[in-house]
Image (cartoon, rainbow, N blue to C red):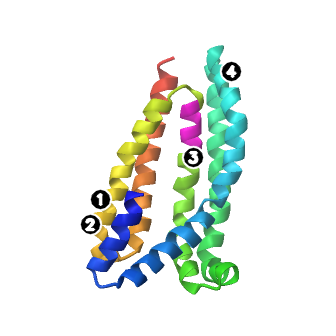
Amino acid sequence: PIISIIIPLRLVSIGYTNEQALSIFGVAMGMTFPLLYIPSTLIGALSMTLIPDLSSALSTQNYTDINTRINFSMKFALFVAFLFAPVFYALGSPIGEFLYSNTQSGVFLTYASPLVIPICVTGITTSCLNALNLEVKSFRNYLISSVFLFFSIIFLTKSLGILSLVWGMGASLVMAIILNIRLLNKKLNSN
């Protein structure tokens, strides 16, 4: 919610009217970002089956099985992400035009297409952490990584406009991945 206030304000501060700022933000968040999260729905289905399996393996302290399942999940997440990212990059404009009759959403989809990869990896690593009873630490990682989004929007909007949202999301997601993988390694290597 804070981002939905800050981005339009930052856009207005660099010369957009209120209507233009809200329109651009609406296109980005209402049209483009839902498309970027489509691959994570496939990975979410995997997460729903993964969580009970990891929890069960954790209760029996079967760390070989835990590692195998996490590795498979990561590979699957990357596979799905690398299927969608090039499609969004190459066909962003036609997709935006076809779905919304809005070229701007398609152009934004092209620019934001690389975000599919960290979105998918962050989703699966967060699910793994939650399954290993590390929900609080996973949430802490989310809060820490959100700082990168916040500061990117504050400082990059002047030079990048709405694309600061892409860079901020990218920085935030990459930081979440780093923190999540570090936490997973720490948990699995300590046992």
The residue closer to the viewer here, 36 or 3, is 3
Label 2 and label 4: CA atoms lie apart by 45 Å
The residue under label 4 is which amino acid type? Ser
* Whether residue 83 is situated above or below residue 130 in the rendered picture: below
Stretch in magenta: 123-130
Does residue 188 sit above or below 79 in this rendering?
Answer: above
Asked if disc 4 and disc 3 are in contact, CB closer than 8 Å, the reply is no
Asked if disc 2 and disc 4 are in contact, CB closer than 8 Å, the reply is: no
Residue of label 3: 123
Residue 169's x, y, as percent? 44, 59
Amino acid type for the residue under numbered disc 3:
Gly
Q: Residue at x 69, y 28 (%)?
A: 52
The residue carrying pointer 1 sits among few (fewer than 14), some (14 to 19) or many (20 or more) residues within 10 Å by Cα, namely some
Residue type indicated by callout 2: Phe
Residue 139 placed where, x, y %? 45, 38
Element under label 4?
Answer: helix
Label 2 sits on a secondary structure element that is helix
Residue shown at the point (72%, 45%) measured from the top left: 45
Which structural element holds mark 3? Answer: helix
Is there a contact, CB below 8 Å, between mark 4 and mark 1? no
Say if 134 sits above or below 155 in the image.
above
Q: CA distance from mark 2 to mark 1?
A: 6 Å
Q: Nearer the viewer, residue 179 or 30?
A: 30
Sequence order check, earlier mark of 2 and 4: 4
Q: Which residue is mark 1?
A: 151
CB under 8 Å between discs 1 and 3: no
Residue contact at pointers 2 and 1, CB within 8 angstroms: yes
For residue 56, the mark is 4
Q: Circle 2 sits on which residue?
A: 155
